Amino acid sequence: MDMGNLTRRNFVIGTAAAAFAMRFQSGLAAPRLSLDTASEAERAEKSNAWLEISTKVFKANIVMLRTYLNEVAADGKKVKICVVMKADAYGHGIAMLLPVIYELNQGYIKAGIEPPLCIGFTGNEEARVIREYEALRSADDRKSMGMPIRLVRLRTATLDEIKEGRRVAADPKKENYDIEELIGNQALAVEVNKLGSEANPIRIHIGLNAGGMSRNGFELTTRSGVVVEEVKKELQGIAGDLKNLKVVGLMTHFPVESRTDDKAGLNLFKTQVKIIDDDPAFSAWKQADRHVANSFATMNVKETHLNMVRVGGALYGDVDDVDYVRTAGGTATAHFERAMTFKSKVASINFYRQGSTVSYGRTRLLTRDSRLANIPVGYSDGYRRDFTNLAYVLIKGHRVPVMGRVTMNTIMVDVTDFIGGADGIVRDSEVVLFGRQGDEEITQDSLEDASDTSGAEFTTVWGQLNPRKLAADSIGTARRK
Ligand SMILES: Cc1ncc(COP(=O)(O)O)c(C=O)c1O
C-alpha cells in the first residue's frame, strides 16, 4: 500500500467526513476530534506553539515491539498487540497515526503470520473518528487492511456512552462503533446486556481486580487468592444468563511500574483465571484473550505477555522513567524513540541590566547584564507554571534556562551566551520545549522532575491545546508546503 496515498486522501475527504460525522454527532464526549489533519497542520504553521508528530518513529516503535515480542516468546506463539490510543493517542493525534496502524495491518494480514493490531481507546469520540476513517476507505482497502479494526475500550464507560456506541446497532446494515466494552461490575453487565441481542451480542472484556487498581474489576478472590463466592456467582450469572454479551477478553491492569509487583499481580490474575477455566459454567470464555501488560510489564516482565499486550506509552517514546532498553533473546535491543516534539519560536530578544528581576513575583534576579529571549508560550498552552526557573529549552542546539515565572502566554529564557556567530540565537529561531534538537534533548524526566507530574499528562494536554503537524521525517506527504 502507498502510505502517501492513504495519508493524502485524508486531506480531500472533507465533505464525506463531515457527512459521516453528522450521523454520529449527538452525545459525544469533548474534545471533538477530526480527520482533517491538513487544516490542523496549516494552523500549526502559523501558531505560537505547535507539536510535530513523527509517524516514522511511531511505526518504528510498533515494528520493534513486534520484533521484541516474537523474540522473547517462549513457545513461538504470536502475542497480539493492542495499540493504546486513548486520549487522542496520548495527545499525538489519532488521525495522524491511524495510517500507520492500517499500513502495518495490511502487511501483517498479507503475511498471515503476525496477528493484526487492535486499538485500545477510551472515549466514543476516538472510536467515532477511527470508524469515520475506515468508512472513507475503498472496499478493497477495507478488506486488505482488516477493517473494521478491533476497538477495545480500556475503561468502564457510562451507560450513555455505551448506548451511543451501540445506538444504531439495531439495524445491522448501518454502521456503529462496534466497541468491545470493559465490564468489571455486575449491575453494569445487566444493563449492557439489555442493549445487545443474542444474534448481535456486545463483545466484552471482563475486568478482574488482580492487579489491584480497584477501578474496573471484579474481586474474584481475596489478595491471597481465596475465592469470593459471591463474586464468582455474579460472574457465573454473566456467563449463564446474560446471553446478549459475548466475553472476548479477561484482563487486569497494574498500578505500579515494578517487576515484583507486576509478577504478584500476574500470579493472582492466573489464580483467578484458573478458577474461571476450571468451572464448566465459563466454558464459553475459553477463547477469550487474556491480557494484563502495559508498556512497563511488556518490556520488563515477559511472563505478563499472555496472548495480548496493551502498550501505549512506549510506542510514543515514553521511555524516561523506566529502562526500556532490553536485550531481547540475546540479539536485539528494544529502544523506543520519542514521537512528539513541542516547539515554538523566539518572538524577540531584549537586553536587561544586572539587578533587574524577571517576570511575575520577582522570582529571578539577573546577576549579570543579560539578553533574554521572549518565547510566546505559557501555561495556557500547557507549558506548566511549575516549570518556573526549573526547565530548559533548546534553541539552535543550545540548552538555555527558563528565567522567572512561566506566565499565561510567555516565558523568558537566558540566551546571553549564544548571541552572534553562525549558531547564534536570533528572532524567529526555532525553540524546542520538549524533544530533540541536534544532539540535545529536553527529556520527559527533566520536565517530570520540574513538575512532579507524568509525561503522559504533558502530552495529552499539549495535544488538546496546540495544533499538530507531521514531523519532517514522517511517512507520506501529509505535510503542506
Ligand atoms: C487499561 C490500560 N491498559 C493499558 C494501558 C497502557 O499503559 P502504558 O501507557 O503504560 O503502556 C493503559 C494506560 O493507562 C490502561 O489504562
Image (cartoon, rainbow, N blue to C red):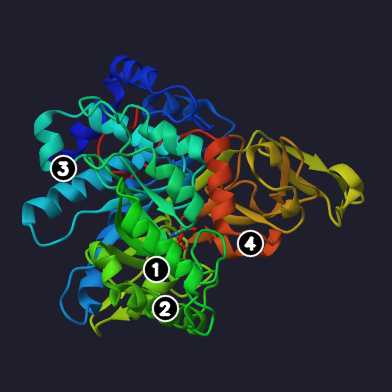
Q: Which residue is mark 3?
A: 145
In the rendered structure, the answer to whether residue 385 lies left or right of residue 312 reads right
| Percent coordinates x, y for residue 301 in the rendering | 39, 79
Which label sits in the foreground, 3 or 4? Answer: 3
Which label sits in the foreground, 2 or 3? Answer: 2
The answer to whether mark 2 and mark 3 are in CB contact below 8 A is no
- Residue at (21% x, 82% y) in the render: 74
Estimate how packed mark 4 is, as few (under 14), some (14 to 19) or many (20 or more) residues with alpha carbons within 10 Å: some
Quarter of the image where the C terminus is located: top left
Query: In front here: 401 or 230?
Result: 230
Give the CA distance from mark 1 to mark 3: 26 Å
In the rendered structure, the answer to whether residue 74 lies left or right of residue 30 reads left
Q: Amino acid at mark 1?
A: Val
Q: Earlier in the sequence, mark 1 or mark 2?
A: 2
Give the CA distance from mark 4 to mark 2: 29 Å
Vertical comparison of 275 with 442: above or below: below
Vertical comparison of 336 with 357: above or below: below
Query: In front here: 240 or 358?
Result: 240
Give the CA distance from mark 4 to mark 1: 26 Å
Q: Earlier in the sequence, mark 1 or mark 3?
A: 3
Q: Which residue is mark 1?
A: 292
Q: Amino acid at mark 4?
A: Glu
Query: In front here: 163 or 120?
Result: 163
Ligand 1 within 8 angstroms of badge 2 C-beta: no
Q: Amino acid at mark 2?
A: Leu
Q: Earlier in the sequence, mark 4 or mark 2?
A: 2
* Mark number, residue 448: 4
